[in-house]
Image (cartoon, rainbow, N blue to C red):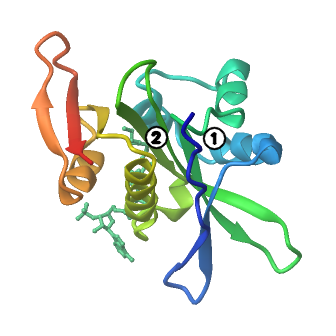
Amino acid sequence: MNIPTPFTNKTYALGDGGYYQIRSIQADDRERIIELFNHLSPDSRYLRFAHAISKLPDDFLDDILHLDYKKEMALLAVITSLTGTEEIIGIARYVTPPNQNACEFSLSVSDNYTTHGIGTHLMLDLIEHAKKNGLQEMIGYVLIKNSRMLHLVSDLGFQTHRQDDDPDFKTVSLPL
Ligand SMILES: CC(C)(COP(=O)(O)OP(=O)(O)OC[C@H]1O[C@@H](n2cnc3c(N)ncnc32)[C@H](O)[C@@H]1OP(=O)(O)O)[C@@H](O)C(=O)NCCC(=O)NCCS
């Protein structure tokens, strides 16, 4: 059995003198994930989930908090207040279907913290982690109108493909 390589926490400057940390998700992050979702605008929720949702489904939260680390990972961008309270400002995740070596990613950054490079850093760390854990490809499904996300992944070297059966989406892929 392969033993998953753990993620080593990283710290990045936020640009305003502050900093954030990227760490792997923990079982007690449930309320903080809900808070992050509450800080996403309806438009950002739509771009992330490809449909309008007003509440994170419980089974989504259960899945994300109990990962199979051999094939899955969720990294969080987190800021810590002076009193030690953590706020999650971004999340990147991959899951790998059974018997496959290509994982599928998703990404969200709090609307209050976009354009600081957080999405890019989350993706770079997620890609590095997937490589270390033996995955061979990372793919994603991005709404065609999500030009910011398409731009972000293109800068990271992902190739973009049309989806003939669903013209609303593009498939993006990166060999690892
Ligand atoms: C798409 C999304 C993840 C981008 O996250 P982000 O943290 O803003 O991404 P980044 O900051 O890394 O990059 C975005 C842009 O900010 C720019 N940027 C990066 N650091 C910056 C800084 N310090 N100052 C100003 N701009 C900066 C980047 O160059 C990039 O610009 P570009 O459009 O010219 O490439 C975020 O907007 C989001 O969560 N959207 C809603 C959900 C979604 O669409 N998810 C994807 C589903 S597949």
Work out whether residue 169 can be spotted: yes
- Looking at mark 2, is its residue's CB closer than 8 Å to ligand 1? yes
Residue 144 visible in this rendered orientation of the protein:
no
> What residue sits 18% from the left and 55% below the top?
157
Location of residue 66 in the rendering, given as x and y in whole percent from the top left corner: 71, 32
Comparing 52 with 92, the one in front is: 92
The residue under the point 63% across, 48% down is 39
Q: Secondary structure at mark 1?
A: helix
Residue at the spot x=29%, y=35% of the render? 139
Q: Which residue is mark 2?
A: 44
Q: Ligand 1 is found in which quarter of the picture?
A: bottom left
**Where on the picture, by quarter, is residue 69?**
top right
Outermost residue on the top side: it is 165
Residue 148 vertical position relative to residue 170 in the rendered view, above or below:
below
The one nearer the camera, 156 or 144, is: 156
The residues tagged by marks 1 and 2 sit, at their Cα atoms, a distance apart of 9 Å
Which residue corresponds to mark 1?
37
In the drawing, does residue 105 fall left or right of residue 12? Answer: left
Instruction: Check the image and name the residue furthest to the bottom.
Output: 17
